[in-house]
Amino acid sequence: MTLKRILVTGGAGFLGSHLCERLVEHGHDVICLDNFFTSQKSNVAHLLGRPNFELIRHDITLPVFLEVDEIYNLACPAAPGHYQFNPIKTMKTSVMGAINVLGMAKRCRAKVLQASTSEVYGDPEIHPQPESYRGAVNPIGLRACYDEGKRAAETLLMDYHRHNHVNIRIVRIFNTYGPRMHPFDGRVISNFIRQALAGEDITIFGDGTQTRSFCYRDDLVDGMIRMMDAPDTLIGPINLGNPGEFTIRQLAELVLELTGSSSKIIEQPLPADDPTQRQPDITLARKQLGWEPEVPLREGLSKTIDWFRQIDLSHYRPPTPNW
Ligand SMILES: NC(=O)c1ccc[n+]([C@@H]2O[C@H](COP(=O)([O-])OP(=O)(O)OC[C@H]3O[C@@H](n4cnc5c(N)ncnc54)[C@H](O)[C@@H]3O)[C@@H](O)[C@H]2O)c1
């Protein structure tokens, strides 16, 4: 295997820190760039002494000059409570971040993998969503700063590819969970686990019949690396996620069972633009990458719950009041 110089933007985050870990293990020279908006150094502290790991505090909305072979572009707040905290900054991070990363890739002839999202499909009218589906996004809604920012980033990748021959990859990531997700990100899995462990009521929005699919982080990181290493003709977009579909109520019940908690499930009003169903069609990933998720929800949740049990929540800053 050829060892490469790899930049991971957003590398201290939930997915980024696991990706860095995996790439460091493979022996690559890894640069983790992050402004720590939604993460903390503790996610990568264990890598700091490694000779093939480097950490840079930097905001990707500003240009940065590095010499690398590959770039995984993950920098962007990902949870609604985080990306709505400063929606203008969220859009800047996706758009200016992509421009800065693509400029670097053009200069270095580096390959860029963009961490896009299932949110580009908005509130979809078809299930499951194949990559050819163009989405139903509300451009003026509360989620638009994230959804439209990610859509614009995909556009930029494609245009740099067509006009400047930048070697690109686009993956559309569906809900992913696991150890090191921010405990106060306001997402359904972290909320449920935190509430169950604290013996508080578990809040579901709406009646809990809306469905989601949940991919364990190891599977996802494996898919991203496969995509980066795939032949240059495979640029995507390609869906990465777990097609197993669960209702929010089923998830709440499973968390209660696995934590052994006696918390109660209570209902609250549904937030604006909350999709009723979200499920990836991963036919392309199966065919082109030979990839599919392997970790069942029960197993992934158990590992995540174990991690939540051993962290000290007072070390995590709730970055927004939305948790
Ligand atoms: N986890 C998921 O379910 C999921 C789903 C779809 C897409 N994604 C995408 O994957 C990527 C990683 O998501 P995550 O779940 O690990 O979230 P995360 O919030 O843990 O990671 C994002 C990282 O980017 C950093 N960041 C934010 N703005 C930045 C900026 N301007 N400059 C530099 N760093 C910045 C944050 O500090 C954080 O470390 C994101 O781009 C997200 O949109 C994640």
Image: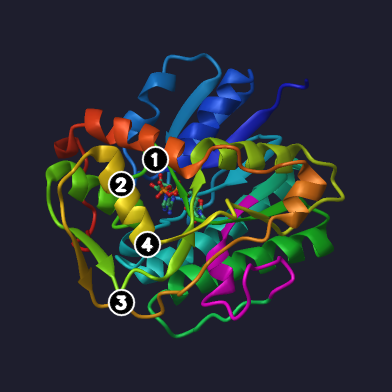
Point out the frontmost of discs 3 and 2.
2
Q: Which mark is residue 166?
A: none
Q: Does the magenta stretch include residue 129?
A: yes
Point out the frontmost of discs 1 and 3.
1
The amino acid on which the numbered mark 2 sits, given as a three-letter code, is Val
- Residue for badge 3: 270
> Image quadrant for the N terminus?
top right
- Residue for badge 1: 301
Label 2 packing within 10 angstroms: few (<14), some (14-19), many (20+): many
Q: Is the magenta stretch mostly helix, strand or loop?
A: loop
Label 3 packing within 10 angstroms: few (<14), some (14-19), many (20+): some
Q: Give the range drawn in magenta.
A: 114-133
Residue 106 image position (x, y, % from top left): 74, 50
- Residue for badge 2: 255
Gap in angstroms between the C-alphas marked 1 and 3: 24 Å
Gap in angstroms between the C-alphas marked 3 and 2: 21 Å
Q: Which mark is residue 248?
A: 4
Q: In this view, does 86 lie to the left or right of 236?
A: left
Residue 80 image position (x, y, % from top left): 36, 64
Q: Do the residues labelled 4 and 2 touch (CB within 8 Å)?
A: no
